[in-house]
Image: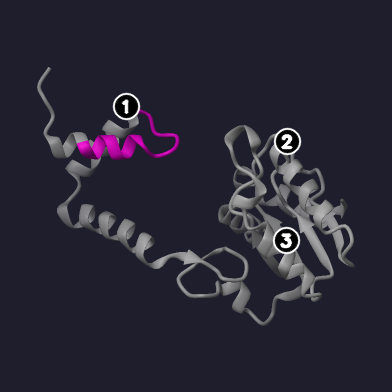
Amino acid sequence: MPELTQSVTNLIDQFARLPGIGRKSAERLAYHVLRMHKSEALALADAVRDVKENVRYCRNCFNLSEEDECAICRDPRRERDKLCVVEQPRDLMSLEQTGMYRGLYHVLLGRIAPLEGIGAEQLTIDALVRRVREGTIKELIMATNPTVEGDGTALYISNLLAELPVRITRLARGLTTGSVLEYANKEMLADALSGRREF
């Protein structure tokens, strides 16, 4: 079998490090890049560079942003007394696509998963508690994924905030246990938001 060039081997290795990409898929992606017009391939490289250089976490909610505050936190039309807690920015985007929720968000940047070595201190839970202690939040909507880890994270947060005068609700179980918000359709998410209940 002929040897691949070092550059192609390196590209395949880099693609193979992406989640959900096996060695064969990495090879297909690498050969696709090789067939692309040079300007398209460099545009892809520039897009990756731009994301790494320009995108950061919002200082309030930890959503992705290219400024200190994300567009949602800057929007004066948002309901500032509601805070929806999600695991990842992609979960926030899934909920936004329903058009049903007009409050603010807080992105945990993960969930408590002891078997994976992820504890509460590695998430943005301390920042969430500070936001709720400020006293402007009247309802906290727990929108962590309906998994063992997501439910455990929600329970941990609700226990931390139990003494504060904030209503804690959970998305209705229009979402099946074990599912992930990112893959739920808009109608299912809309039902879950409108049918939320006390935690």
Q: Would residue 136 be visible to someone looking at this image?
A: yes
Give the extent of the magenta segment: 10-22
Amino acid type of the residue that numbered disc 1 sits on in the rendered structure: Lys
Image disc number at residue 84: 3
Q: How is the image coloured?
A: one colour
The quadrant of the picture occupied by the N terminus is top left
| x 74%, y 35%: residue | 177
Percent position (x, y) of residue 133? 78, 70
- 10 Å crowding of disc 3: few (<14), some (14-19), many (20+): many
| x 81%, y 43%: residue | 173
- 10 Å crowding of disc 1: few (<14), some (14-19), many (20+): few
For label 1, the residue is 24
What's the distance in space between the residues labelled 3 and 1, CA to CA?
A: 39 Å
Amino acid type of the residue that numbered disc 2 sits on in the rendered structure: Val
Percent position (x, y) of residue 63? 57, 63
Percent position (x, y) of residue 175? 74, 42
What's the distance in space between the residues labelled 3 and 2, CA to CA?
A: 19 Å
In-front residue for pair 13/163:
163
For label 2, the residue is 148
Sooner in the amino-acid sequence: mark 3 or mark 1: 1
When asked about the image quadrant of residue 75, the answer is: bottom right
What's the distance in space between the residues labelled 2 and 1, CA to CA?
A: 32 Å
Percent position (x, y) of residue 87? 64, 51
**Which residue is situated farthest in the top direction here?**
1
Sooner in the amino-acid sequence: mark 2 or mark 1: 1
When asked about the image quadrant of residue 102, the answer is: bottom right
- 10 Å crowding of disc 2: few (<14), some (14-19), many (20+): some
Horizontal relation, residue 22 to residue 61: left or right:
left
**Which residue is situated farthest in the bottom direction here?**
76
| x 62%, y 74%: residue | 73
